[in-house]
Every structure is written in structure tokens, then in C-alpha cells.
Amino acid sequence: MANRVDVIVHPRIHLGLLSMHRESPRLNGGIGFAINGPAALIEISEAGTLTVRDERSCPMAAAELSQLQGALEGFLIARGMERAASIRIFGDMLTHVGLGSATAIRLGAIEALAILNGCGASRVELVNASGRGGTSGVGINTYFDGGLICDVGKRNEGQPVLPSSRADPSRLPLALPALAMPEWPVLICIPRSIAPKTQEEEIDFFSRTAPLPEGTSFEAAYVALFEIYASAAESDYASFCRGVERMQQTAWKRAERSEYGCALAGIGDALLRAGADCVGMSSLGPLLFCFAAPAQMSAIAQAARLMGCDAHQTTPRNCGREIHCHDA
């Protein structure tokens, strides 16, 4: 068995939730895609007791670190594993900005712990142990596969609409076949002056906003499937960008964006003026992403920095996490 396991996890862009009305036969659903960076490294090695340290420049809050450790301890006990571990988290992937770091890091740490113990764990077992994926199936699928994921939610059995940090993951969302994303360049922009939502604020947003009228779900599902998913499958860049822009006008995404008011809207307008072909907000933000021709990317990144954003150019990712095992 390995004495150290490294897992490199990659972000995802979440374009929007789809089915958010009360009487829907299926709840939630979502669409999004993996990107190559900024990534996080989870380094796990054998130790006498289980410890978790987040050594990123902006680490997760103490309560979330405790939740991660609790999930790992539960997995260790449930599987009867004997090797505890020291777990350290590094990298530039930020928390609570819209990159899906909570899901990716939790899955990566649990999978690394299983490998360290020589314990075979299926994909479903890893996801169930993570407690993630109860709202959207995008992050739990991009972790393993990359690409573009569209999921059609899970059966409505009267459960409340909650974010993934609180939703019951016992029944996972049903995902359509993953698509390979074309290698269109992506710029992600993280506003330094806009505070990300905390886990508690995210829960409050869901309680204030859901449910929506049924027509809003029909619109979002149409845009996701007939515009974004279909355009990616056919490598139709112009139609894909129109779909991203239209998703920003759907009711749930408008509500998410309105949490940040004019400050975020002004940054988006500046990116479009600088040459972006479309601009969207990932998840509950405040991260903005845009697509543009390669020749325009430098000018758009400069515009983003002038607006007080950290800007990173990346590309879609069509494979999942990277795992490296080390012997003594």
C-alpha cells in the first residue's frame, strides 16, 4: 500500500439550477462544466490520528473544516479502516466563490483515505460518504469525469429545496451522458471587493428564493438542454455563448446575481465591452466567467484587473481528478 497519496482536484463552473418549482416531478437539476484551474492539491499520509489542515492562502472556515474531518472520520469507521492520516490541502482553488471546492476537496480527501488504506470504494460509495450532490449532480460528476454535465435532478418526494451543504444526498441526481467540452478559452474573474457568501448565507438564500413559479423552470431547462448542452455537443460556439447569456436571465440565476447588486453587474458589463462573447456567474458567485476569442483574452483580463478582480485564464477539462501514489 502507498504511504502517501496526492489527489489534484479541479474546479467546475456551475451555469445554473433548473427545476425549482414546488410541484415539479423532479427537483433541482443543473448544468455546468469542469475547468483546469485554479486547482487544489490534497496530500494525505499515514499518521497516528486523523488531522486535516487547510494551508491555502484563504482556507475554509473552522466549521467547514470540522465538517470535512467529520465526514472523513465517519468513512474511516464505517469501512473499518485502520490507517488514520494527516491531510493537508494546498493550491489556489478558493472556497465559496463558485468553483465547487467543497465537493471536490471532500471527494478527493475521502478517495485518498480509501487508497491509503488499500480499500476499494466505488464511485457511488465515495459520493455517499462525501455527503455532497444532494442538490446538483454537476460537481460530483465533474470530479470523476470532467466535461459538461447536465443533470435532471431527483424525484420530488416532498423534500425541501436546500444547497448541497444541507441537502439529503441519499438519492443522487440523474445525470445525462457527459459531453467533452470544446477547447474554448475561459477567463474566470474573482472580485476582490465582493465578499463571498458563507455557508449560512447560502442556506438563507435558498430559503428566501425557493420555490419559483413553474414557468421559470421550463425556461431554464430549455436553455440548458436545447441551447447549452446541444451547442457543446455540436461545438457551436456562437449558440453556446447565447445559451450562457440566456441562462443569466432565468429567474433563479437572476436572483443569485441580484445578491451582489450593481457592483457585480458593472464588472460583467466591463468584460463585455472589453470583447467577451458571453459572461456568466458560476453558482452563487461572486465568480464571473467569460468566453472570448484567444486574441481578446489579454485585453479582457486587463479590464477585469482594472475592475478589482483576480483573473485566471483556463480551459475546459474533459477528465477528472489526478491521483498519485507514493511509497516510502
Image: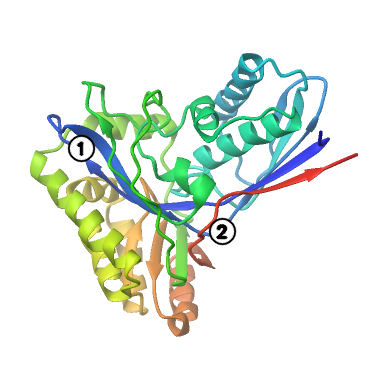
In the figure, 33 relative to 231: above or below? above
* Residue 248 placement (x, y as % from top left): 24, 57
Label 2: element kind: loop
Q: Residue at x 27, y 52 (%)?
A: 261
- Which type of secondary structure does the marked residue at label 1 adopt? loop
In which image quadrant can residue 137 be found?
top left
Tell me if residue 162 comes above or below residue 303 in the rendering.
above
Q: CA distance from mark 2 to mark 1?
A: 30 Å
Q: Is residue 87 left or right of residue 93?
A: right
Residue 60 in view here? no
- Quadrant that contains the C terminus: top right
Q: Residue, x 21% and y 34% (percent of image)?
A: 26
The residue indicated by pointer 2 is: 37
Query: What residue do we see at 10% from left, 39% from top?
Result: 214
Q: Which residue is mark 1?
A: 20
The vertical placement of 295 against 102, above or below, is below
Task: State the image coordinates of residue 30 (x, y, percent, origin top left).
Answer: 31, 45
Q: Position of residue 84 (x, y in %)?
A: 76, 22
Q: Mark on residue 214?
A: none
At label 1, which amino acid type do we have?
Met
- Between residue 266 and residue 205, name the one nearer to us: 205
* Mark 2 surroundings: few (<14), some (14-19) or many (≥20) residues within 10 A: many
